[in-house]
Amino acid sequence: MRRDERGSATLIMLAVAMLLLSVGLVAVLWAAVSTAQHQAAAAADLVALSAAQAVVAGEDPCAAARRIAALQAAELSDCRLDGEVVLVVTGVRAELGSLGRPLVTVAARAGPVGQP
């Protein structure tokens, strides 16, 4: 007996289309998180440098860090002063559509040259 194979190509194409759609969705989500990570890293570096400059100027480094983080559309999660070295953690929300807006955080530090 011979089986009727009519329609099997349709099922194969449907499976291939679903696979391509899934790969595309993963690529878009990965790009969104990667972009947020780069933005958070840039904001963390700028915030840490601004806070270190505030230390040198005799100002409150965490107040400067909060101000600069707000200007960069980032959230300041942590700000600590260790001697003359400022440690900050900033975050940026990744836009994932209906999947939510997770916070991508990055740490940075800045201070005088030669400090550990």
Image (tube, rainbow, N blue to C red):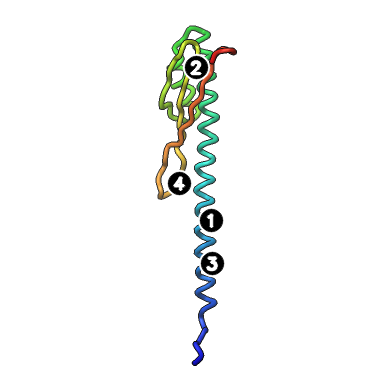
Sequence-earlier tag: 4 or 1: 1
Q: Are marks 4 and 1 in contact (CB under 8 Å)?
A: no
Sequence-earlier tag: 3 or 2: 3
Q: Is residue 9 above or below residue 32?
A: below
Which mark lies nearer to you, 3 or 2?
3
Sequence-earlier tag: 1 or 3: 3
Sequence-earlier tag: 1 or 2: 1
Residue under pointer 1: 24
What numbered label is drawn on residue 96? 4
Which mark lies nearer to you, 1 or 3?
3
C-alpha distance separating marks 3 and 2: 52 Å
Residue under pointer 2: 51
Amino acid type for the residue under numbered disc 4: Leu
Residue occupying the far top of the picture: 58
Identify which residue is drawn at 53% across, 66% down.
Answer: 17
Residue under pointer 3: 16
Amino acid type for the residue under numbered disc 3: Val
